[in-house]
């Protein structure tokens, strides 16, 4: 009899332990996720801080960024580059992918807004205080992003055309592969001035803002974000996109000079 009682107790203990182990198993085996995010290079510093914060709270998620000019990123996505989320610095590139059914339309949102500014080196001795001053003879070179692929360059061209300047000064323009390269050209005095986003100027102590693009001189600078139609990490992508537009993401973006989208 004692033998049977001991056997019964052993079985009960085994069942209890197995049940406890079963309840804790999901946390121990949470799937690792690699999330590929193609984003405008002007978001570089904000996204780096967000990456650190997000991965600390979500250790199973590894964020892999592909940063560059929005037009270049668009082409890469069209050619099959791995991407779960796309964040453009202009609506055109997102519209192009939308037209080709490469994004999930239902997830598209205007994530951020920005401003366009004219910058010079802090020690510049030239009298550059407004966009019109780029037409002065002493200004021999100014930098903008390549308008065909760099949204900041597209906006810059719009401003200069609106002000009636582009035709007369386009030969002075040094076209850069992305907006951060424009910033570098000004920082190193390879050009007398450059047109960049306000957020780019804010991260550098080697340039100073001398003018903000006049209201109405260019299309609104909107950063749309969307999940790619072909993502295999739908849930993780939804969670990260929600985080970007949530209070923690907002705090970081505003720290770097962005305004949240409407």
Image: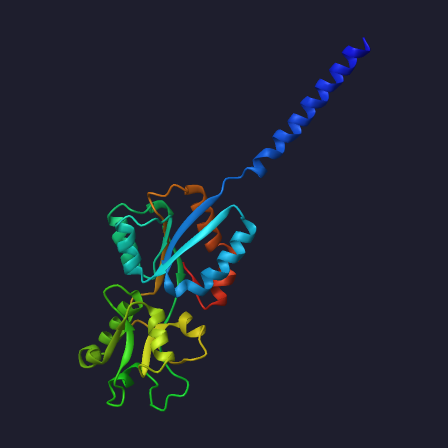
Residue 100, compared with residue 121, is above or below; it is above
| Image spot of residue 250 (x, y percent) | 49, 60
* Residue name at image x 46 percent, y 55 percent: 244
Q: Position of residue 153 (x, y in %)?
A: 28, 69
- Please say if 131 is above or below 126: above
Residue shown at the point (23%, 65%) measured from the top left: 148
Q: Quadrant of residue 149?
A: bottom left
- Which quadrant of the rendered structure holds the C terminus? bottom left
x, y percent for residue 58? 53, 48
Which residue is at the front of the view, 28 or 125? 28
Foreground of the two, 75 or 256:
75
Residue at the extreme front = 3
**Picture coordinates of residue 49, whole percent (x, y):** 50, 61
> Quarter of the image holding residue 162?
bottom left
Figure label count? 0
Say which of 101 and 207 sits in front.
207
In the picture, measured across the screen, residue 166 lies left or right of residue 117, that is left
* Visual colour scheme: rainbow
Asked whether the viewer can see residue 140, the reply is: yes
Q: In the displayed structure, would residue 104 be above or below residue 167?
A: above
Query: Residue lying furthest top in this view?
Result: 1
Q: For residue 160, what is the image quadrant? A: bottom left
The quadrant the N terminus occupies is top right
Direction from residue 221 to residue 175 in the image, left or right:
left
* Residue ranking furthest to the left: 167
């Amino acid at each position: 009899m004692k033998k049977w009682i001991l056997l019964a107790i052993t079985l009960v203990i085994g069942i209890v332990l197995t049940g406890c182990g079963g309840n804790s198993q999901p946390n121990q085996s949470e799937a690792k996720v690699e999330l590929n995010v193609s984003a405008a290079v002007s978001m570089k510093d904000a996204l780096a801080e967000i990456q650190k914060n997000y991965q600390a709270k979500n250790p199973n998620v590894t964020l892999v960024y592909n940063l560059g000019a929005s037009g270049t990123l668009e082409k890469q996505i069209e050619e099959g580059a791995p991407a779960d989320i796309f964040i453009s610095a202009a609506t055109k590139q997102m519209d192009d992918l939308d037209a080709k059914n490469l994004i999930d339309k239902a997830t598209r949102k205007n994530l951020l807004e920005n401003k366009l500014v004219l910058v010079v080196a802090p020690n510049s001795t030239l009298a550059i205080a407004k966009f019109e001053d780029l037409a002065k003879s002493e200004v021999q070179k100014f930098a903008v992003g390549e308008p065909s692929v760099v949204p900041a360059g597209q906006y810059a061209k719009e401003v200069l055309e609106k002000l009636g300047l582009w035709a007369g000064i386009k030969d002075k323009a040094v076209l850069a592969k992305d907006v951060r390269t424009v910033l570098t050209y000004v920082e190193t005095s390879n050009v007398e001035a450059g047109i960049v986003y306000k957020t780019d100027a804010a991260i550098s102590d080697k340039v100073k803002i001398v003018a903000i693009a006049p209201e109405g001189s260019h299309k609104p600078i909107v950063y749309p974000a969307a999940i790619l139609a072909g993502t295999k990490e739908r849930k993780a992508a939804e969670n990260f996109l929600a985080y970007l537009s949530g209070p923690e993401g907002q705090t970081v973006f505003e720290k770097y000079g962005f305004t949240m989208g409407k």
